[in-house]
Amino acid sequence: MITRLAELYLASLKRVDIVPIDAVRTLAAKQGIALTEPLIQFHERFAGYTEQMGRDVAVWGLVHARPQWLTPYTLEVFDAGEVLMACADAHPSYDYTLTMSGEFVGSGAGGPCESFEVKVERNAEVWRVMNSGGRLDLEQSTMPHSAQLAWIENQHLDMVPAASDKNAQCLANAQWLVLRHDNGSCTVWRR
């Protein structure tokens, strides 16, 4: 279940025609791929939404009829020590992939996240800040790690549970939105 904010964010995105899930299942069977329930749910819920990333676009979904970066009507599977499946038609540098258990890898696209829902929640938090006149705060985002941790402690931030997981904590107050990654780095937006 996603939050009302995430629903509003999704409603703001352009949504294109999708390859229906029954066709995705048929294509998966032809390719010898056993679709897991998390992958099926991802496609049913999010396929066709277009995420703008600067000048680039990612069209979410497992299979696409007219992709720019993927093969049409094909599930793209990668073996990187574990099986990963492409989950968007996007430039490969964004690494839009899901594990078979539904974890979003997406190292160049806001990941990793325990689920695509968490990615959507994080996107929604940033969308809210940016649409209310906020901006990325490069000064806070690039300060030395120890100074950044001290700064965060002094801001009295509350955790945003829907946008937080084992990979990153999303923290916010009336002035700041902070994404604190498990590697210690932080991205900061000023409201």
Image (tube, rainbow, N blue to C red):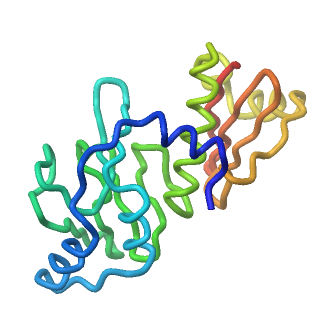
Q: Residue at x 34, y 74 (%)?
A: 81
The quarter holding residue 21 reads bottom left
Residue 166 in percent (x, y) is at 66, 61
Residue 1 in the figure: left or right of residue 77: right
* Pick the front one: 76 or 16: 16
Q: Residue at x 36, y 64 (%)?
A: 43
Residue 163 in the figure: left or right of residue 55: right
Q: Residue at x 32, y 58 (%)?
A: 87
Quadrant location, the N terminus = bottom right
Residue 4 in the figure: left or right of residue 80: right
* Pick the front one: 5 or 169: 5
Whether residue 148 is situated above or below residue 181 in the rendered picture: above
Whether residue 32 is situated above or below residue 12 in the rendered picture: below
Which residue sits furthest top?
A: 133
Residue 70 in percent (x, y) is at 15, 53
Q: Residue at x 64, y 36 (%)?
A: 186
Whether residue 54 is situated above or below residue 106 in the rendered picture: above
Residue 181 in percent (x, y) is at 63, 46
The quarter holding residue 130 reads top right
Counting labels gives 0
Quadrant location, the C terminus = top right
Residue 187 in percent (x, y) is at 61, 32
